[in-house]
Image (tube, grey):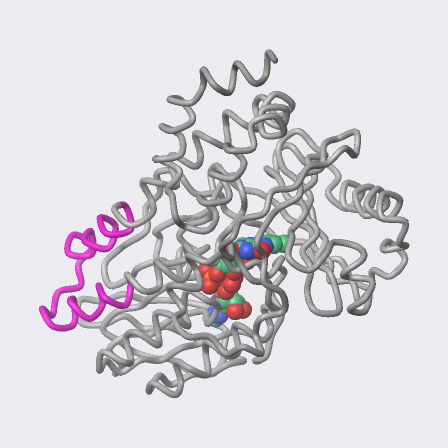
Amino acid sequence: MYDVTIVGGGPAGAIAAHRAAKAGLSVLVLEKAKYPRDKPCGGGVSQKALSVIGKIDKELVERELFGARIFLSDHRNFTEILDDRIAITTMRRNLDHWLIKRAEAAGAVVRDCEGVTDLHVSKDYAEVVTSGNRYRSRIVIGSDGVNSTVARKSGIRKRWDDGIGICLEAEVELGETLVEECVGTEIAEFYFVGDWGYGWVFPKSDRISIGVGGWKTEIHEPKRFFERFAGDVSRQKGIDIKSRIRRVNSYRIPAGGFDRRIVGDRVLLAGDAAGFVDPFLGEGMYYAMKSGEIAADTVVDAARDDRFSEEYLQRYVMRCEEEFNYDLRSALKFANVVYGHQNLFLKILERDRRLFREYLRVVRGDRTYTDFNRWCIMRSPVTLARLVI
Ligand SMILES: Cc1cc2nc3c(=O)[nH]c(=O)nc-3n(C[C@H](O)[C@H](O)[C@H](O)COP(=O)(O)OP(=O)(O)OC[C@H]3O[C@@H](n4cnc5c(N)ncnc54)[C@H](O)[C@@H]3O)c2cc1C
């Protein structure tokens, strides 16, 4: 019997496995796909996410981002750049593989091509079922993404009730020179094209990630929405991006900031499985990794105390609340205000560059949304004056 079975070896699972193995627990990771595997993602890793990872292999860094360019619906745009690095871009295939290998080196047993199909929790252990095997452990971390089997089979959540988004993304090979002409080397682009979401272009070494995302209820024909966006970007750049797209990946994304159950007896959910994603920006990797880290610490405590009840595991809920989940609620408030008054918000951002810079500091991790919301209220007379002038 293992101390902990981690279902799903993405960023949440890999960070949890590394930390729990380093703390001396026996750890089993079960991953449905075969490594290295792709995950639909822009591959933007914020500075705050990098601080959870710690030292990272330089080879994983495709580009370093210091700023953002915002496009308005009439194609006008404005840019802000910070002195400090805000994020890097990476290929998820490489990052996730590197993270899981690091966990393996720390002692975790990793089995890929082993998807979990069922889960039984008894008084003395939790048992997960895969196509060919059954594994018992004292506790299970469900880090199996937005379509979490662990959430469903444990009865923690049968389906998502609210706050579900959808994103479509493509990696387009352009070659280094065209990438630099298209976006530049140190900037991510954001296009506010729909009412409740945005499009992005992120530079990688020899390709770009281009995508759109928004609330599922607001995007009625996602594929056409994406195609229109890719066509617009092609025209705007004078580069035929659209015809170079080989494959478009579509994936759900759970917006954070909602009240959701994330623990049961002998089970914890982390990352997308728990719904931990910034509801404004769609950033999920930081929250996946941070919750994976907290899940591992909680499991270490639970193993020491030999207590695995839902009641005991409330300490995980509380720590997530303190570390980032309260702030995700502030992010949701921010998202509702901004997407409800998008044109006004963009006008403000264009005229009040200090506000734009402070928001970039939120993405970097220097400020929380809670802080930022308060700061925006205090600053509103200045912002208003700039708008009027
Ligand atoms: C198009 C798109 C673009 C995005 N861009 C960004 C971005 O630029 N930056 C950012 O920070 N976030 C981004 N996100 C969000 C980010 O991708 C997720 O929040 C993040 O991957 C969550 O990590 P995770 O470990 O919780 O889940 P995942 O990365 O989804 O990993 C879950 C793992 O579990 C495995 N699995 C699933 N079911 C089972 C099963 N039954 N048994 C075993 N294994 C299973 C999967 O194969 C997968 O490896 C984006 C999301 C989308 C959809």
Q: Considering depth in this image, is 178 or 289 the residue closer to the camera?
A: 178
Q: Considering depth in this image, is 220 or 301 the residue closer to the camera?
A: 301
Residue 302 magenta = yes
Instruction: Give the farthest residue toward the left.
Output: 305
Picture mark count = 0
Above/below status of 248 relative to 132: above
Magenta residues span 295-321
Q: Which image quadrant is residue 149 in?
A: bottom left
Residue 117 magenta = no
Above/below status of 274 relative to 25: above
Q: Which image quadrant is residue 240 in?
A: bottom right
Residue under the point 44% across and 64% down: 50
Q: Position of residue 304 (x, y in %)?
A: 11, 72
Residue under the point 38% across and 71% down: 54
Above/below status of 388 relative to 264: above
Q: Position of residue 298 (x, y in %)?
A: 22, 63
Residue 146 visible in this rendered orientation of the protein? no
Horizontal side, residue 234 vs residue 276: left or right: right
Image quarter hosting the N terminus: bottom left
Q: Main secondary structure of the magenta part?
A: helix
Residue under the point 48% across and 47% down: 363
Q: Position of residue 351 (x, y in %)?
A: 61, 25
Horizontal side, residue 47 vs residue 290: left or right: right
Horizontal side, residue 83 vs residue 55: left or right: right
Residue under the point 47% across and 19% down: 382
Residue 60 visible in this rendered orientation of the protein? yes
Image quarter hosting the C terminus: top right
Q: Position of residue 383 (x, y in %)?
A: 51, 20
